[in-house]
Image (tube, helix red, strand yellow):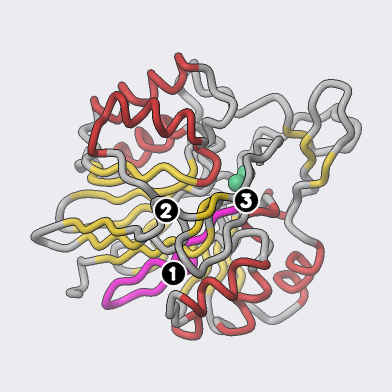
Amino acid sequence: MNSAEWRVTVVVDNQAGDGLTAEHGFSCWIESADLRVVFDTGQGPAFATNAARLGVALEQANAIVLSHGHYDHTGGVSAALRKANRARVYIHPLGFEAKYWRTDGGAPRVISMPEGVASDLLERNYELRCGTGARTIGPGAHLTGEIPRRTPFEDPGREFFLDAAGAEPDGLKDDQALYLDTPRGTVVVLGCAHSGAVNTLEYVSELTGGRQIHAVVGGMHLLQASAERVDRTAEALIRLGVGVVAPCHCTGARAASLLRERLGERVVDCGAGARFEFNADETRCAWGGAKARAHSPVDKGD
Ligand SMILES: [Fe+2]
Ligand SMILES: [Fe+2]
């Protein structure tokens, strides 16, 4: 790899290739010649075993990026830090808040960052970089910070709260995406895209002065989205000219297949073990686990 080329390996996802553990959550390992980044860490159990099986050199990580505070993205942070103990950790300050999932009449479920992870981050001597705005984390790698909510059709969901009683909605302002400068355009890595996938991509486009978005990898939070919303997401991906779309985690199988109907082969299969190489002359997407085990669908939208 030269310094502008990147490899992205999915470490944790709701689906997993042979020999890997599937889990409702997301994590990937992102590397160039100059930088190695852990992006999210799943719920915890799958992270360390999958990382070891995939040959991920966690001890070489320069940064751990947390897309937001939910447990299915932050649960493996302590395991990551045990190996990557000199990595900078990037998180929005609201990622530490208590977070709940509650539907009408249902019992509240805690979906915050696990307490042990929060205390590890806050009480040990790790290099914690809390911030709300866009910033560069290393050569060719950037965080969006808070993402403006502009589209009328991307509702972040009415089931997220900051209290167990369900009185105070959680606007999920801690949600952020990572984006990479690659030879063929920008590559965007999403955690859950609670701000809306289209809001995220349009904001990345703005932050990069309109540079072509080449690929999108990650959770698009369309599990409970209307067909209209999925359709409008597909329209935006087409309008933005995105060449590779790898929807996983909270995108949901129904939305992923609707996206495939609209975008055809630009939509690629993705799960734990998938590897994407963004080189100067080609983009490679490989996942041996297209028929792999899938974690059963979840009943919550975290
Ligand atoms: Fe998630
Ligand atoms: Fe989430």
- Circles 1, 2 touching at the beta carbon (< 8 Å): yes
Q: Is residue 192 above or below residue 126?
A: above
The percent coordinates of residue 125 (x first, y second) are: 68, 81
Residue 212 image-quadrant placement: top left
Beta carbon at label 3 within 8 Å of ligand 1: yes
Q: Which residue is mark 1?
A: 37
Please state which amino acid type lies under the numbered disc 1.
Answer: Val
Q: Which residue is mark 2?
A: 178
Q: Which residue is mark 3?
A: 24
Q: Is residue 202 above or below residue 182?
A: above
Q: Quadrant of ligand 2?
A: top right
Q: Using the numbered discs, state the Cα–Cα distance from disc 1 to disc 2 in whole angstroms.
A: 10 Å
Residue at the image point whose x is 70% and y is 70% from the top? 121
Going from N to C along the chain, the mark reached first, 1 or 3, is 3
- Circles 3, 2 touching at the beta carbon (< 8 Å): no
Label 1 neighbourhood size at 10 Å, few (<14), some (14-19), many (20+)? Answer: many
Q: Using the numbered discs, state the Cα–Cα distance from disc 1 to disc 3 in whole angstroms.
A: 21 Å
Residue at the image point whose x is 73% and y is 29% from the top? 159
- For mark 1, give the secondary structure: strand
Residue at the image point whose x is 44% and y is 78% from the top? 56
- For mark 3, give the secondary structure: loop
